[in-house]
Image (cartoon, rainbow, N blue to C red):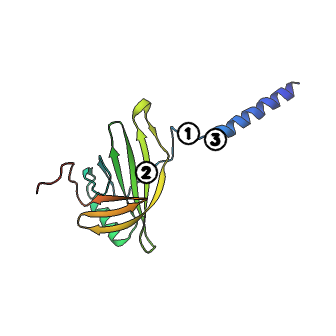
Amino acid sequence: MTIIICAAIAAIAAAAAAVAAAWPDSRHPAALPHASCGSASTHFLTGRTRLLHADHGALACFITAARACRLGSFGVTELGVDTGTRYVFAIEPGQAPCRVSELRQGYSANFGGSQDAVSTVPCRSAAITRSGVTLTCGHRDVLIPAKVSGLTPPSA
């Protein structure tokens, strides 16, 4: 009888371990890849993005990589009050036209903090100009500006 009880407990423990291993762990989701060119922050990532801050040389690095269709990636954090989204735009060379992916991960500082799973959307490069790199990712346009400009539009 003792052997049967021990075998049943072992089977239950093995089943519980299998369920726990398959269950998504919201406290430790997969992380975004490192942005090789550096990163920046904004309040709104759109076709008219205005950056609040960028790492030194990050914008020039990404624009150069996009222009040459060279391996490179750029991170952008879209800041909210206590939630936001982190993005990495990754250029993958070797294909024509140049392949770019948008990886995104939402986050929240509420109730101890949390992160969503990383999702990926393919992009196409719409234009590389003095203004920056314009991408179409999914069904929206995204501008990675050539310079930090803050939130207020420049005076005319």
Mark 1 or mark 2, which is nearer to you? 2
- Image spot of residue 130 (x, y percent): 23, 67
Instruction: Return the residue found at the far bottom.
Output: 96
Disc 2 versus disc 3: distance between alpha carbons? 24 Å
- Dot 1 amino acid type: Asp
Which residue position is annotated with label 1? 25
Q: Earlier in the sequence, mark 1 or mark 2?
A: 1
Q: Residue at x 27, y 56 (%)?
A: 48
- Image spot of residue 72 (x, y percent): 38, 63
Q: Residue at x 51, y 43 (%)?
A: 29
Q: Residue at x 52, y 39 (%)?
A: 26
Q: Residue at x 73, y 36 (%)?
A: 14
Residue 111 picture quarter:
top left
Can you say which quadrant of the picture contains the C terminus?
bottom left
Q: Is residue 90 above or below residue 108?
A: below
Which residue position is annotated with label 3? 21
